[in-house]
Each structure stands twice: as structure tokens, then as C-alpha cells.
Image (cartoon, rainbow, N blue to C red):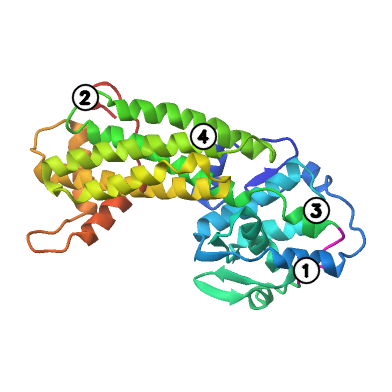
Amino acid sequence: MPNYLLAPGAPLPLSTLAELLANGETVALGPEAAASFIPAGAPAEASELAGLRAQAYGTGPEAPQPLVRLMLLLAVHQAVNEPIGLARPTAERLLAMYNRELLPVVFEQGGDAAARAHLVLPLLGEGEINYQGYRLATADAFSLFSWEPLALRAGEAGALLRGAPFALAYAVDALLRAQRLARAAAAIRALAMATETPEETALSAALAVAAQAVAGALDHAEAAPLAPALGQLAAAVAALGQAASTRAAQRAAGPGPLSLAAHTTTSSQLVAAEADAYAALRTRQVVENVEQLLGLELLATAAGAPTGGSESGETLLAAFRAAVPGGGPGVAPYPALRQAAAFVRGHAWLAVGPGGAQ
């Protein structure tokens, strides 16, 4: 039985998305959603299918597979809430790919139209799919489940190119990670000082604005552009990273973090003026950089922190030291840096209360 049913008019809140992604839960069309799709019509014209193929001009690095999986879900959610001309078998195949984690190869460069084309090209039996660590031709991947390519109906190829699942998937991921980053920053700061910093306050405000914009885009495909809200979020995250890098440099890490912080700040200033797809991509990169900068601050803090701090602080430092053994004189620092960033991304950060209590 599926864990979650899509229904027309039902919102897909960020909290639900976070649970679905974290727990790997399966999703299906609810009864009302299944009945809302158009009846199968005449076969699509060859020119319509050619138009879909022509949009598959993506290039650059591959989109991370968890985000491609999210794109599949968002594409079906849009089709359920704002009928765009898909037949039910098409939506069900996209959901089956989501549930079985047959993930189309999608590229980060090219914009939303290219990403969407690569996302749906496997419906025709074309393109490539990542499955269980292997990159396969779609025909080979489908053969594992005795699936045949779909015969799209008239209008479906154009409908499949509507919407912006790429931009929205990257925006959702950036926002969820930035929320975790805010909790991490508060906990790391509480190791040395009790008072919330101006950067934390600004990030809280930016998170609220971005959450509202992303929620609107999740509910309505024609919502306002995401770039302005993402620009505010990226700037606030970059400022948080700049402050963290300054503290890390002062404590133990030397000037190295400052160059990454400067690059991150410069990158964040470009977000608001970009199209949503590139704004979301750049915002996620800014968040990723600041995860590293907070990891650097935590490395510097752990190296020089005296014992006898608060119970929550000692627990945090013990968990960090266990996950990040660190190096020593003459040892290249990059393994510890990666481990520190992974700790910031993956630790179960709790909200910090007065006096640094979690």
C-alpha cells in the first residue's frame, strides 16, 4: 500500500515533502486524482514528439538523483492540482518511476525546459536512467519491470513541458537545508556565546519569506517568480557563512575560510536577477558552501574548546569529534573538512533556546 495519496486541491507542504524524501515513502494517485485525468485521445503527432525531443539539450553536471526523484513527484503533483492535459497512464508511469527510483538523467545546465524534457524523455523509451547505482539506457531499465514505452496522446508532449519541477526541486532542497543550517548555526554559536547574532536574525526572516514563496509555487504552477525570495535567502545564508568564517579564522583555521566566504557572498548577489532555475541552483550552491563554512567553524571550536561547558554543548562536541576525528600537523585538512560539512548536513540539530539549551 502506498504511504501517501495525491488528491486534487490538496497542498503538498514542505513538512510532508521532507518526510517523503527522508523516509522513502511511496506515493500514488488517490481516487479523486485518478478520476481527474483526461480520457485517452488520438495518438500524438510525430511533430509533437519531435518538439519534446528537441528540448532535451541539457548539459553540464548531472542533477543529484534525490532531486530528480523530487522532480518526478512535483511533476505529478502539478498535473493533479492543475490539469495540464495528461492522461492517467502517463501520470502513473511517472509515479512508478518515482516509487521504484528509476531516475532519469537530468542535467543542471539548460534551464527548466531542458530539465523537464530530460525528465520525461524516458516515457518514450529514450534517454538514460540511473537505477541502483547503474546508468542504463531507458529501454534496458524498463525491461527489468517488463515496461513498454508509452504511446503519448495528442497534447501530452506539450503538457509534459509545462511547469518548473527543476527550479522547484532545487528551491525546496535549498530551503530545507537552509532551515537545518539555521539550527546548526545557533547550536554552534551557543558553544561560545548565548546571544543570537544579527546574521541569525536576518536568516530567520529570509527563511520565512522563502518558505512562503516556495509554498505558493508548490500549490500553483503560475505563482510569482521564486528568484526574489531566493535572492534574499541566499544573501542571508552567505552573511551567516561570512560571520562563521571570520570566527573560524580567528580561532584556529587561519585565513583559508575567508576566500570561500567571499566567493559565496559574490555568488549570492547574483541570485535575485536570474531566472528561477538558475536562481534555485545557485541558492543551493550557496547553502552548500555555508554548510562547509559552519563545519570549519565547528572544527576550529572543537579544537580549542575547554571542557566544562553546557551539557548540550559537550554532547554536541562529543558527537562531532566522534564523526570528525580531525588531522594534525602536516596532515592535509580536506578529509576533515568534508567530514565536518557532512556532519553539519546530517546531524539532528535541535532548536536552541535561552542560554544555549537545546
Q: Residue at x 19, y 33 (%)?
A: 191
Residue at the disc numbered 2: 194
Q: Which residues are magenta?
A: 149-154
In the picture of the structure, the residue carrying the numbered disc 4 is 229
Task: Judge whether residue 323 is colored magenta.
Answer: no
User: Which residue: 59% across, 55% down?
Assistant: 111
Say if mark 1 contacts mark 4, CB within 8 Å. Answer: no
| As drawn, 6 above or below 68 | above
| Nearer-N-terminus badge (2/3) | 3
Q: Tell me what residue is drawn at x 39 percent, y 39 percent.
A: 180
**Precedes in sequence: disc 1 or disc 4:** 1
Mark 1 burial class by Cα count in 10 Å: few <14, some 14-19, many 20+: few
Pointer 2 or 1: first along the chain: 1
Is residue 341 visible in the rendered image? The answer is yes
Q: Amino acid at mark 2?
A: Ala
Q: Contact, CB < 8 Å: mark 2 with mark 1?
A: no
Question: Along the horizontal axis of the image, is 271 left or right of 83?
Answer: left
Alpha-carbon span between mark 3 and mark 1: 18 Å
Which residue in the protein does label 1 denote?
Answer: 50
Q: Residues within 10 Å of mark 3 (few under 14, many from 20)?
A: many
Q: CA distance from mark 3 to mark 4?
A: 31 Å
Q: Residues within 10 Å of mark 4 (few under 14, many from 20)?
A: many
Using the rendered view, name the quadrant where residue 136 is placed.
bottom right
For disc 3, the marked residue is 86
* Picture coordinates of residue 345, whole percent (x, y): 36, 48
Q: Amino acid at mark 4?
A: Ala
- Residues under numbered marks 3 and 4 in contact, where contact means CB atoms less than 8 Å apart: no
